[in-house]
Amino acid sequence: MKSLKYLSGLLLVALLASCAELPFEQVKVNEGILEGYVEDGMRVFKGVPFAAPPIGDLRWKAPQAAESWEGVREAREYAPAPMQGGNPAGGKSEDCLYLNIWSPAESSKDKLPVLVWIYGGGFSFGSTAEPVYDGSKLAKKGVVMVSIAYRVGQFGFLAHPELSAESEYGSSGNYGLLDQIAGLQWIKDNIAAFGGDPNKVTIFGESAGGISVSMLCASPLAKGLFQGAISQSGGSFGPTRPTSYPGENMKTLENAEKAGVEFMNSLGQTSIEDLRKLDAEALVPKGWGMGGAWPVVDGYVIPDDQFKLYEAGNFNDVPVLIGYNSDEGLSFPTGRTPEEFIRNVHERFGPYAVSLMEAYPVGGDRIQRSARNLMRDAAFGWHTWSWARLQTKVGKAPVYFYYFDQHAQNPEDSTTFDYGSSHGMEVAYVFMNLDPNNPQALDSDLSLSETMGTYWTNFAKYGDPNGETLTKWPVFSNKYPQVMCFGSDAYVDKVPDEDALNVLDSYFVWRRAPEGVAWAD
């Protein structure tokens, strides 16, 4: 009888000990217990709230802390995307501030490096639920993969004098960037519970996400929240301008507030209070980028023109891996005919139009790739090149520069199409989520994808993308401006179209001079 009681006591002790640790798919965070699921050895948590729903009086306010909950909260499904036009993956809602986690860690003691994805979409669209953003394959390379949502469009970036007056920091707009910063703060506070290292976080994003990465690198509010940055077709080094053009999208707070007043007037409203009462769908503009859907130089999140911030050494000096695609201009046409293209170039570049069209020739009866490259470089190439040169000159952390030039092949005869890599084409390669059933996804594509995924995760682990089986990726320097090119293979080359970039650079120098500022205004 005594031995039976002894065994019962041992069983009770064992049971209590087992209860001390949560099941493999459960994790305790600051707000409560989350329950995700396990798939192929990976712990997955979706729809994790990192801030309070930005609804009602919190519309157009900085994100607030997420509320705690009792019991166990299921985290098995993506949350809706932010309000936007169309029908994004996962649906849409104003209640949208959630993140997703893929962790291969076996325990909270693993301290794996963390990769944090920020989606693109012109600051007007985007969803973490897009299948191409599934982070399981990257996570299998030994990182904790996280994707965060942020407000877009007028919900994320509306500036208005009333909003500036009511804020604690005297400005408005940039709520979407504040969402990203809140997400990074939540990660710093909680990611250790998922086996991640809060002191080894790398942010990465594409297009508006890559531009966001650039802005976070320049924002004092994000200091210490990440230790590495990857920008794919991003960068925000252009001067402010009242009329937005790709690469010159930034507005001063004053001009952004004027745009916000116009947006309010277009809806027949006279106050922010009334605007907050409108149904969310009524605030979704019909056209791309309307309603102040772009970050603003607000003096708070973004203190100044980013080029000037970097010149002065006022940025978060962390290792960066940055680049762009060879035929970005294919996705952003500036005219349907050569005549229309020439007219648009004169309208945007003024006295520099002629020299730029000599550097980027239009061609005869069609707009050839060299002309499309003007759009590529004005929106992405020059910004990446300037970022690399400025950080190399002023900062201490290394810069790794890439150029993605994988050409799609015709499945009928295996010939290569005459266009290069369009905007966003590299994303599926980085996430290693190419469709193997796609006839254009050849063995070389799958191999390149594996290579890029390895470079990206190595960078998250070491601040250096290199590894034993990979082509050596040199650090960019102004003396030796070398670039890693991703095509049918990975190889090192010089900066593409550097002579043309220098002509474009002279335009941006002029735009920042008093004469150029007056001309743009």
Image (cartoon, rainbow, N blue to C red):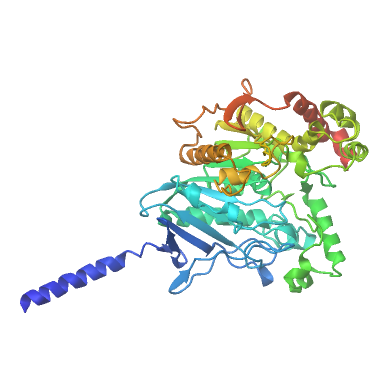
Rendered location of residue 477, percent (x, y): 60, 25
Rendered location of residue 311, percent (x, y): 68, 32
Q: Quadrant of residue 277?
A: bottom right
> In the image, is residue 318 above or below residue 295?
above
- Determine the residue located farthest toward the bottom in the rendered image: 1
Total numbered labels placed on residues in the image: 0
| Towards the viewer: 283 or 301 | 283
Quadrant into which the N terminus falls? bottom left
211 displayed left or right of 519 = left
Quadrant into which the C terminus falls? top right
> In the image, is residue 52 above or below residue 416?
below
| Towards the viewer: 229 or 239 | 229
Q: Quadrant of residue 129?
A: bottom right
Q: Quadrant of residue 320?
A: top right
Rendered location of residue 500, percent (x, y): 78, 26
Query: Is residue 342 in sight in this rendering?
Result: yes
Q: In the image, what residue occupies the spot 80% across and 53% down? A: 256
- Determine the residue located farthest toward the front in the rendered image: 413
| Towards the viewer: 418 or 455 | 418
173 displayed left or right of 224 = right
Rendered location of residue 138, percent (x, y): 50, 47
> In the image, is residue 76 above or below residue 494?
below
Q: In the image, what residue occupies the spot 6% across and 77% down? A: 2
Query: Is residue 477 in sight in this rendering?
Result: no
> In the image, is residue 70 above or below residue 303?
below
Q: In the image, what residue occupies the spot 66% across and 43% down? A: 425
